Amino acid sequence: MIGRTDNIWSRGSTSSGYHPCSYYLLSLHVGRCLSVRKSFLIETLKDNRDFEISHASRTEWFGSDSKISSFSPVDGSELGKVTTGNKDDYEKLIKDAQNAFKSFRKIPAPKRGELVRQLGNKIRENKAELGELVSIEMGKSLQEGLGEVQEMIDICDFAVGLSRQLYGLTMHSERPNHRMYEQYHPLGIVGVISAFNFPVAVWSWNVALAWVCGNVCIWKPSEKTPLCGVVCQKLIADVLKENDMDNGISCLINGDSQVGKWMSDDHRINLLSATGSTRMGKDVAQKVGARLGKSLLELGGNNAIIVTPSVDIKQAVINIVFGAVGTCGQRCTSTRRIIVHESIISEIKTELAKAYSQLKIGNPLDESNHVGPLIDVDAVNQYNSALNLIKNQGGKLIVEGGVLLGDDYKSGCYVKPAIAEIKNEASIVQTETFAPILYVIEYKGEVQNAIEIMNDVKQGLSSSIMTKNLKESEIFLSASGSDCGIANVNIGTSGAEIGGAFGGEKETGGGRESGSDAWKVYMRRQTNTINYSSELALAQGINFDL
């Protein structure tokens, strides 16, 4: 059963404050994407008109620059167009956000949590539709699309509880009749730059925490998945309207890398959270660092699973395959490398090849398929380039790759997951290829040797060990073990769980989102000392008499 049809996609109305054509999508050919079931999108997105929105506050949709087309990797059809914003449009958003912050920061945190609670409920009501849109526009399987929306719901629940736990500390002063404590205040404007592979979850991870902390947000979605951004803005816009809150609390701007540069250079952006490639992250870090601003970076991964002799092979193979081919290898936590002990490497290769032969590749909305498409033809070209480099750098393909052709793959974005045996030091292994290519690497001797191989890359996001040996697992989790932000035992590398701080080390950027004390990055820390005596007592026993 598909949910209601009047929440996300209904026509705008002047009574709601939106431009009358706000919710019309243009040039929609979504029906061709669906081979399994009748979609909500087919029923509601019928207007063959341009989607004339670019960046939006609660009550106003506008745009002045060129248009971006959204193409589905499912069948290559154009889903719609959004209008991008120019510099004047950007300045308007900044001013709206600044004005909104002045009032929003004064609202008690539990009341801000109520806003997030309502957003979570709004997402629950529209989970089926939003999950399907994620699958159509990004290309991940329907189950993964629904799972991503569930992450949005979960982070809202987490943030609601957090809104009553923004704790500071009280300390004893060395000075008599003094009190000293720490407290946290909102930063101001939080900018969010998100990537195509998680077009809705990353936004929610950031804004749910930012809002309960008292900040306002400006979001630049990926230009490859702009419609997902528009729908999310519509959801929060409705919540803001229902609560009579300022329109600048949540702002959206569509555009290319130029918008990201504006945000990076802008001292009025108090925190810039950027998710994407390491190359992009380095550029953001340099620009934000040059103005001594704050950044939260979630960048590339080169994630490995160590497979030891004591492993449960069946369990390991399932974890490896899902990590390597889920989302067609386009997760930052996708499994890129497996480091296997020489005594079992032959068996592991055989079992993986057998598992890969059972993979079904095709329309991600068909739940019988395991693997959907890459995001676009550029990604396919990078995949092909990586396969060539594997051969040129001494690798051997265990499972051959290739681009799939035919009526079922007419977008040109469907590829075969591949497995290659290769040395860890090969340059292609040292880089992150956003595609379903798995590298098999042999290790000898003790588990520490495997750990050294695993850590010998520039990225440090996610890692895992498959073992029944308690000693090996504890070494892996120790200070001399994995150098990644995430280290798992008998669980694969992919999949973030709300509550634990998500992020990685080294060229992964060092940022942490969605759990633990990650909320602190969205606030400024202040130490306060109060003198309730009639004396002037200076620290360190200093006297200053006049």
Image: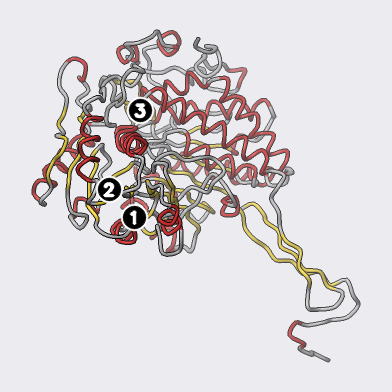
168 on left or right of 266: right
Query: Looking at the image, which residue is at 81% across and 78% down?
Result: 175
Whether residue 364 is situated above or below residue 3 in the rendered picture: below
Label 1 sits on residue: 459
Find the distance from the CA under tag 1 to the CA under tag 2: 9 Å
Which quadrant is home to the C terminus? Answer: bottom right
Residue at horizontal 37 percent and vertical 34 percent from the top: 65
* Residue type indicated by callout 1: Gln
The residue under label 2 is which amino acid type? Glu
User: Which is more toward the observer, 364 or 310?
Assistant: 310
Helix, strand or loop at label 1? It is strand
Q: Position of residue 447 (x, y in %)?
A: 33, 58
Q: Pick whichever of labels 1 and 2 is earlier in the sequence.
A: 2
State whether residue 122 is above or below residue 282: above
Judging by the rendered image, the residue that carries numbered circle 2 is 432
Residue 539: quadrant of the picture: bottom right
User: How many residues crowd mark 2 within 10 Å: few (<14), some (14–19), many (20+)?
Assistant: some
Q: Residue furthest right?
A: 534
| Residue at the spot of label 3 | 140
Task: Please report whichever mark, 2 or 3, sits nearer to the chain's N-terminal start.
Answer: 3
Say what secondary structure mark 2 lies in: loop
In the rendered view, would you say 398 is above or below 475? above
Does residue 268 appear left or right of residue 110 in this picture?
A: left
Q: Can residue 223 be seen in this view?
A: no
